[in-house]
Amino acid sequence: MIMSTVSETPVLDTLAAMTLDSLERCGLPPDTLILTRIAALAASEAPPISYAAHIDPATRASLTAGQVQDVLVAIAPIVGTARVALAAGNIFEALGMAIAVSEGEGGL
């Protein structure tokens, strides 16, 4: 029997559930997992909201801005400078969104 729940954010809820399932099935340490996901987001030209979804897990994994920068530097020769520059801008925008939400300015 499939049970459905009514939600005001069904898409975000589905993405969150998929992410949680992935985290539970992955054997990588939390910091390595998040850095790997950031590299994949950069390679796929992900939008800022995709990075925003990883801010809390990155914080919980005690990642630093330097580590994220190191990942972008490491993948630049593979994915290209345009994608890395786009990723850096999208990460910056995602952080701005997270700050606005935490300060009660709306946003997500």
Image: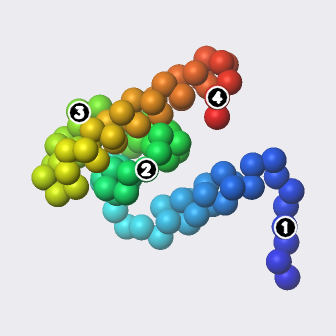
Taking depth in this image into account, of 29 and 45 the one nearest to the observer is 45
Mark 4 or 1: the one toward you = 4
Circle 2 residue: 46
Check if mark 1's residue and mark 3's residue have beta carbons within 8 Å: no
Of mark 4 and mark 2, the one earlier in the sequence is 2
Q: Amino acid at mark 4?
A: Gly
User: Residue 77, how many percent across, how many down?
Assistant: 13, 52
- On screen, 73 above or below 33? above
Residue at the spot of label 4 = 107
Q: Residue furthest front?
A: 82
Residue 70: tell me if it is visible. Answer: yes
Q: CA distance from mark 1 to mark 2?
A: 29 Å
Q: Give the residue number, with chain letter if any, for mark 3.
A: 66
SS label for mark 1: loop
Q: Give, as a three-letter code, the residue at label 1.
A: Ser
Mark sitting earlier along the chain (3/4): 3
Task: Locate residue 108 relative to residue 27 in the image: left or right.
Answer: right
Q: Residues within 10 Å of mark 2 (few under 14, many from 20)?
A: some
Q: Say which residue appears at 81% left-offset and 47% top-offset.
A: 8
Of the numbered discs 4 and 1, the one sitting upstream in the chain is: 1
Question: Of the residues tagged 1 and 2, which is closer to the observer?
Answer: 2
Return the disc, 1 or 3, that comes first in the chain's sequence. Answer: 1
Mark 1, residue position = 4
Residue at image coords 48%, 61%: 23
Q: Are marks 3 and 4 in contact (CB under 8 Å)?
A: no
- Tag 3 or tag 2, which sits nearer the N-term? 2
Q: Which amino acid lies under the numbered mark 3 shown in the image of this protein? A: Gly
Name the image quarter holding the N terminus. bottom right
Distance CA(mark 3)–CA(mark 4): 26 Å
Q: Is label 3 in a helix, a strand or a loop?
A: helix
Task: Tell me which corner region of the image, top left, top right, bottom left or bottom right, holds residue 19.
Answer: bottom right
Q: Are marks 4 and 2 in contact (CB under 8 Å)?
A: no
